[in-house]
Image (tube, rainbow, N blue to C red):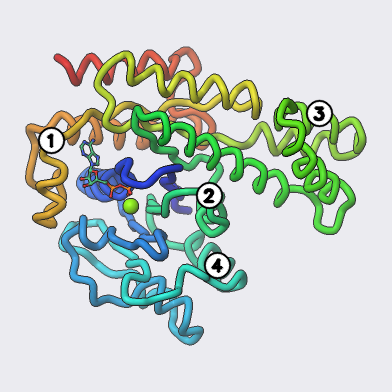
Amino acid sequence: MAKIIPVASGKGGVGKTFFVTNLSILLAQKGQRVVAVDLDLGGSNLHTMLGIKNDLYGIGHYIYDKTLPFDKIIHRTEFDNLKFIPGDALFVGAANIPYFRKKKILSEISKIDADWVILDLGSGSTLNTIDFFLASNCGILVTTPELTAVLNLYSFLKNSFYRYIFNGLKKNAEVRDRLVEAVKTRLEKENTTFCELLKIIKKDFPEEEKRIDDLVNNFFPKLLLNMGNNERDIAFGENLRKIIKKNMGLEVEYLGLLPEEHQARRYVIARKPLSVVENESKWVEGCSKIADRLLEFHDYPVTIFEDDVDSLDVVYDDMRFVIE
Ligand SMILES: Nc1ncnc2c1ncn2[C@@H]1O[C@H](COP(=O)(O)OP(=O)(O)O)[C@@H](O)[C@H]1O
Ligand SMILES: [Mg+2]
């Protein structure tokens, strides 16, 4: 079965599509069979970064045409081993995707025959994006060292985590209603963390304690710092990890740090993936290292690095590599 890696962020413009484009190409160059999927409905532009013309059947067609086989929207690219599913750039309004169609898309994605399926998501906490992010329990969270990007990413993860727990509880069970209720009233009492809230629910529903603990212990999002160059930038990631730990009880592992890349915009405008044209770029080298990390995923989907490796040290190494 393919490893599904959704790539999400709280804020737009942090480099998700740029990363998905180059990561997909680099993994494919390393001999992996990759399918890159544009799931930024309403804002699809993965085709542009991949240098592919916007005239192919994609998710937008699939949403509307129930007779269209899913295979028909998986296209070959000029890059060996890399296939591509376009988004909905040819449509207006496809972003309002009906629930059963979304379920069907998720089920088809889980059946794709490949080594890696990389999902390029829209920015922010809309329900579609959260559901696509939850296609795997080890999605990648991207942020830049910028307060609004970090805060929005925190909101995105909080919303996703809540929906993940909600989905994991039994349907029509009282405990679900209780969770919804608790989250609602918490809004009035901001000082209760999501962690504490789950504790209260477990106490009220002891028979659900194991299920809730299993859910919490099986959620492993990874954090990528893009456009980071120095210790101050890393501090943004550390503050984010601290607040996630405190409020959600989750230890988020770093995937790595990628630097500012001054050529990025130029190549996007030229519709040429950076990893194809630039082999001198620190960003591309860093992205290639990240591809290797994914290939060596120590204990998929739990930890990328060996148990005795602290991912913060890895991020510091990435930073030193940038300023070398
Ligand atoms: N590390 C980087 N350094 C400089 N510019 C970058 C970097 N990563 C991405 N960009 C640029 O930022 C812009 C937004 O990136 P994009 O991938 O479209 O963001 P998102 O998909 O998160 O909205 C693009 O023009 C891209 O080239
Ligand atoms: Mg994008």
Question: Which quadrant holds residue 256?
Answer: top left
Observer-side mark, 4 or 1, equals 1
Cβ atoms at labels 3 and 1 below 8 Å apart: no
Amino acid type shown at disc 2: Ser
Image height of 191 relative to 42, above or below: above
Which residue carries the number 3 mark?
A: 199
Which residue carries the number 1 mark?
A: 262
Cβ atoms at labels 2 and 1 below 8 Å apart: no
Give x and y (percent) for residue 53: 18, 70
Residue depicted at 72% across the width and 35% down the height: 214
Q: Is mark 1 within 8 Å of ligand 1?
A: yes
Q: Whole-Å distance between the Cαs marked 2 and 1? A: 29 Å
Image height of 164 relative to 64, above or below: above
Nearest the eye: 39 or 135:
39
Q: Earlier in the sequence, mark 2 or mark 1?
A: 2
Which residue carries the number 2 mark?
A: 125
Q: Earlier in the sequence, mark 3 or mark 1?
A: 3
**Dot 4 crowding, Cα within 10 Å, few <14, some 14–19, many 20+:** some
Q: Earlier in the sequence, mark 4 or mark 2?
A: 4
Amino acid type shown at disc 3: Lys
